[in-house]
Amino acid sequence: MTFTEQDYLNFLRKVERYKEVLQNTERYRQYWEAELKPALLEHLRKAAELAQLPCLVEERSEIRNLGALVLSLGHSQSGLGEPLGEGLHRDLIKHNGSLVYQQLFNGKIMVMINYPYIERYGQPQPPKTLAIYRPEEIKEPYVIRHLETFISEITFWEDYDDDRPDENQRIGFKLNFERAEVREKEN
């Protein structure tokens, strides 16, 4: 088996790309610490204050270079209680949801929503990833859009009503019947 000069050039290009990605990781991590994290803290706190949104904005940094900023709506009594006998009840706690800016292993930033859930009442919904960004891509208008999406999603969760059809949960044959019914009504 012989390798051509072109084979070596292709390999060299891939090695250069690999080195570039590693350098980007370091650059992203530095940008997160020096620029993005302080700016995000300011934007999130400012927006929450302007909207009078009761929340906590906190930094999590248990593992170096895997930090996160979390806008949490906290915990509360759900209004539900588990009977313990003899007229006693244990309150079920509701986790009210959070918006998370999580630094990934490669320095990029994942933005996600943790949905509310009530302990001991079903399973929590998996988090919803809004996007993954290079740190320098996240600007204040994006943060506002993330906050709007977060509040919309949390509001929808709180106002859950199974009578409303979820457009993403329709079954194909049902959709065909609904269209046929519309056509019949139109004729």
Image: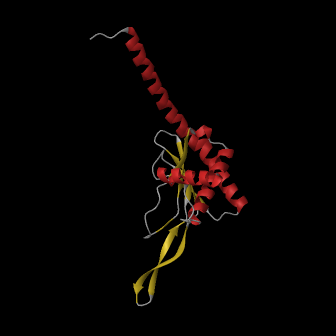
Q: Is residue 49 left or right of residue 12?
A: right
What number of labels is visible? 0
**Vertically, is 137 above or below 143?**
above
Q: Residue furthest right?
A: 50
Residue 137 percent location from the top left of the image = 61, 38
Q: Is residue 161 left or right of residue 2?
A: right
Please tell me which residue is depicted at 47% across the width and 24% down the height of the picture.
17
Residue 46 percent location from the top left of the image = 70, 55
Q: Nearer the viewer, residue 187 or 121?
A: 187
Q: Nearer the viewer, residue 150 or 29?
A: 150
Please tell me which residue is depicted at 57% across the width and 51% down the height of the picture.
179
Q: Quadrant of the N terminus?
A: top left
Q: Quadrant of residue 51?
A: bottom right
Q: Residue furthest front?
A: 187
**Vertically, is 100 above or below 20?**
below
Please tell me which residue is depicted at 59% across the width and 57% down the height of the picture.
153
Residue 135 percent location from the top left of the image = 58, 40
Q: Quadrant of residue 121?
A: bottom left
Residue 89 percent location from the top left of the image = 45, 83
Q: Nearer the viewer, residue 177 or 18?
A: 177
Q: Nearer the viewer, residue 164 or 147?
A: 164
Q: Residue furthest bottom?
A: 86
Indicate how the structure is coloured in the image.
secondary structure
